[in-house]
Amino acid sequence: MKLTSEDLADLAVGAAFLGTGGGGNPYVGRLMVERCLDEGLTVELIDPSALADDALVIPTAMMGAPTVLVEKLPSGEEAIDSLRLLERYLGRRADATMPIEIGGINSTIPLVVGARLGLPIVDADGMGRAFPELQMETFGVYGVSGSPMVVTDEYGDSTLLNGADNKQMEWLSRMVAIRMGGCAYIAEYSMSGADVKRTAVPNTLTLAMRIGRCLRTAKARHESPFEALLRLLPQTLYNYGRIIFTGKIVDVARETRNGFSLGRARIDGLAGFAGTMEIEIQNENLIARVDGKVKAIVPDLICIMDSESAEPITTESLRYGQRVTVVAVAVPQIMRTPEALDVFGPRCFGLSEPFTPIETMV
Amino acid sequence: MRIGIDVGGTNTDAALMDGMTVRGACKTPTTADVSSGITAVLKEVLRITGVAASEIQAVMIGTTHFTNAVVERKRLLEVAAIRLGLPATKALPPMTDWPDDLAGVLGRHTFMVHGGHEFDGREIAPLDEKEILRIAGEIRARGLRTAAVTSVFSPVTPVMEQRAAEILKNEIPDLAVSLSHEIGRVGFLERENASIMNACLADLSTKVVGSFRNALKELAIEAPFFISQNDGTLMTPDYVERYPVLTFASGPTNSMRGAAMLAGRKEAMVVDIGGTTSDVGMLMQGFPRESAVAVDIGGVRTNFRMPDVLAVGLGGGSIVRDDGARIGPDSVGYEITSKALVFGGDTLTTTDIVVAAGLEEIGDRSRVAHIPAKTIETALDTIHRMVDEAVDRMKTSAEPLPVILVGGGSILVSRPLPSASEVIRPENASVANAIGAAIAQVGGEVDRIFSLEGTSRDIVLGGAKAEASERAAKAGADPATVKIVDVEEVPLSYLPGNATRIRVKAVGDLVMA
């Protein structure tokens, strides 16, 4: 499947939805991909099932602060250099690249790499949403090593890193990215086609585009975008979604601790929803409670959307008075196993509540 | 005494103010040369108030001239767009996301040079001064007269932009140079875009400011004059000649501040109801709350200090459907005098509803006598619900606020609004823009990423506040009146050293000679 400019606009909306408030604004990444299309390059997606078992896939991404990225734009070579250096280390050329994270800006970086190198981009990722750290990957959960990893900046500096485990890789590379100016570009979790089929969350690039298109076309037809979205989800791997709250934001509190943007949004119910919903945020929306009772919890998606325009609202742009609709979505089973919850379940974010699937909550 | 002038696309308005009292106000058509329209309106306002030109202490002008030039792609110069940031930023050259017609008018003379800084002030690369020299030669060869210089993280440290300007001016003394750190905030593409737009207005700004000067001279007004900027503060004419882009969107700001003055409120919601839309904005400490998101001007993405205005599709010409349950967003607009029922047309508009309800006497009331009482009631409910929701959306806390109604469409609102503590309809609302210009203050702003490590939040905030106050004083504010009106902190995740982006704004009254 070859992407068009219209697909990119839909992807940006869908990626913001799947980012559940985090992941960074995909604007800069989207412009980079559009530039590739303007130059006549092609952005070609490949279904994971179409990969040969022995194909080599090298995922690429940005790591660091999206706030730095919007000021220090990339040279455009960084992620490509990371992939090339990893190829050299592995002694083999990549057959495809792939996102590690579908939420936010990282849905777009591999598209630029793929277009520039003439490689297909695997329609899958390793988070199925956005998460703040590199070990929070289904790839790692099911045994793929994040290392060897390459971190590159715009100066042409590269670091090849072999972490003892994926958490150690995250820890070390984070410091490298900071030295590189707060924002760097990586290649990691190289794996075989067979590993992709076994460990990746499949078809998330096309899912993001379908979500974006669904919201856009519903609005154009003057239908409820929320109803259209809830009709779409059962046709996907994210097979359940529900509006868990509608209301008005009455308070947003923020602070930074341990490198995380922590926050709390309070929403007073409207239109048949009673009580007050409180959403806890660590870069992404983690848990939603109404009067103390849990209504949705990570890794299931908690998306805050503008009640009128159905635009997903990122954490930075939440503010008093917005009329919002909160949609919770079941993530695929591959992200809900005990092994997966050990890596990105509630406890990994310091939450004491156990994971409860959204479809069994009342 | 001071005079506020609003030079709009259609009308030029003036208001003569004695302190906070409106002594008189009038309107004349805007003229092609700008100058004669201003002269006419000044003469008229002096005549009706009987005030002598020598009694005027200051003249404040608000204008949409520069915005209109960019939107219409007229009277613009070709620009040398110089970026300091290589090896970073190469992926997206200057003007990447611009509409082709505007980029074409500006000539796409783009240059990328080694330089720029990291968020913590380290150099990305030393400034390539030889390359700047070469570009100066290129600028001369291409006959360009204006340049925009944008360096990565220049809001953190502006030294490279300043050095590049020094080299360029040394080579080409009459080159107009726009520096991005003077214009925008963090957010590279948006700041660069604003700087390029500023540069393309270099000629026009000299002409327009010159015509303002001439108009005042002709009437022997020797008082200093100022021009209002986006955030409702004033700039000196010299500053506007260099930074015309900062006048973009000063119109809504002046209108909101004028409404505030007329109503005598500093904390309020202003609802400006026109023919097609209602613009709702919030006043905090007498200033409009600023927008946090990128704003497109003439199709170009920018991050100007602009008032946060919510436009709702409700106006005096909005079309009423579903027996009053649905109103707008489409409107009969300027054709209201032929299309609305009361004017003999065939379209049911909001104006027809208020006439049918007996709330206003407009046009021929017999033409709306057939509208069922239930439709009238439903439509009035819908109108008030729309205004009330818009007001509530724009509030920053649950407290009810006074609502100031201005604009021709304000006749639509006849009932109390649940979100409002009271509804105020001030006099002279039709010249609110000119009044807003007349009462504008002088501001200074700081917007940077600070590290809180090894220091305390209070010390850093204190330093930022002092710097903003200093900038306000430098811009002409009386230091004794300067106060901090806005503090915003955004913690930056993923960055070390507890990095926080802090924005502080200080304003004060203009020093009157």
Image (cartoon, helix red, strand yellow):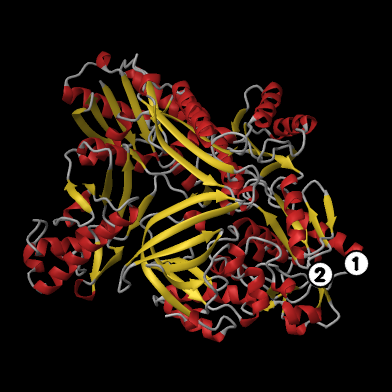
Q: Chain of mark 2?
A: A
Against A158, residue B479 (above or below) is: above
- Please report the residue visible at 83 percent of the width from the left and 52 percent of the height from the top: A158
Q: Chain of mark 1?
A: A
| Local crowd size for mark 1, using a 10 Å CA cut-off: few (<14), some (14–19), many (≥20) | few
Q: Judging from the image, what secondary structure is the residue with disc 1 in?
A: helix
The label number, if any, that marks residue A90 in the structure image: 1
Q: Judging from the image, what secondary structure is the residue with disc 2 in?
A: loop
For the residues labelled 1 and 2, say whether their Cβ atoms are less than 8 Å apart: yes
Q: Nearer the viewer, residue A97 or B425?
A: A97
Q: What residue type is disc 1 on?
A: Leu
Residue A216 in view (yes/no): no
Which quarter of the rendering shows the C terminus of chain A? bottom left
Horizontal and vertical percent position of residue B221 = 32, 17
| Local crowd size for mark 2, using a 10 Å CA cut-off: few (<14), some (14–19), many (≥20) | many
- Please report the residue visible at 54 percent of the width from the left and 84 percent of the height from the top: A239
- Please report the residue visible at 43 percent of the width from the left and 59 percent of the height from the top: A265
The image quarter in which residue B248 lies: top left
Question: Taking A253 as reference, is B50 left or right?
Answer: left
